[in-house]
Amino acid sequence: MYRECRPPSPLRNAIACFWVRSGQRERVRVIPDGCVDLVWRHGAGTRVAGPDTRHWLSECGPDELLLGVRFLPGAGGPALGVSLEELRDDQIRVEQLGRLRRLGLGGDCTPREVWRRLPEIAAELVGSGPPDRAVQYAAARLLDSGQRVEPLSDELGVSDRHLRRRFHAAVGYGPKTLQRVLRLLRFLRASDGDLARAAAAAGYSDQAHLTRECRRLTGLSPSQLLSERRARPDVGARRARLPSAVVSGRACLPTPV
């Protein structure tokens, strides 16, 4: 079982969802989604799952329970108090991060207690480190299949290097990598069985481009990935979501820094 719950309204600019997973005997393919997760596992405690640039296989035994909170692109680094570049393609215990050492979500907690406390903890973390609005604005623009990365720094009034540095801290990698991740997620949402049409709609130059990128990010061909998702829709690829307030456009354009 895998289920997601929407966060309270005040947290929707930073939190994608709260989630629970249990009772799965097989391994599940997790693909990049631009997000970072705080994950509690019954009996093991809490870890931070950093931003992914490639797929990995998650295991959860039939008697295990996982609870988590997923931070949106641009929100994870500030909330967790660490440059996400340091956590890219990695998972670490919260005791290794200064701001998270006193969360009190050890493996001996009850699932009910953890589920009750996760929104409080998320609110505290986001309050201590609000999302990087410049990065979220750029990420929202990259949801558009026709958007190029190069003009974003001019729109924000910063240099390319400055924007990349903020992306590496708040997302874990640069805007071009996030663009690749969001493009793959667009393909997964748009696919209706016609790979060439879905590739064009998602922003790929052609079907061969889609195949190369899909293999690099997921380890599978597009058709294999779609077949796997159809077989297990409850644990399919996570969706990177951006809040409507960010997607609304220039109203959220931050003051250049």
Image (cartoon, rainbow, N blue to C red):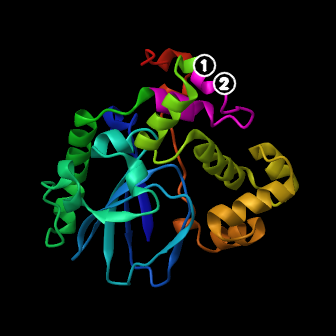
Considering the image in quadrants, where does the N terminus appear? bottom left
* Residue beneath disc 1: 154
Drawn side of residue 77 relative to residue 159, left or right: left
* Mark 1 vs 2: CB contact within 8 A: yes
Residue 225, can we see it? yes
Name which quarter of the figure residue 75 lies in.
top left
Task: Give the spatial CA distance, label 1 vs label 2.
Answer: 5 Å
* Residue beneath disc 2: 151
Q: Is residue 124 magenta?
A: no
Which amino acid, mark 2?
Answer: Pro
Residue 167 image point, x, y percent: 48, 38
Q: Is residue 158 above or below residue 32?
A: above
Name the residue rendered at 53%, 47% in the picture. Answer: 240
Considering the image in quadrants, where does the C terminus appear? top left
Drawn side of residue 231 relative to residue 6, left or right: right
Q: Secondary structure at mark 1?
A: helix
Residue 180 is tagged as: none
Q: Which residues are magenta?
A: 134-153
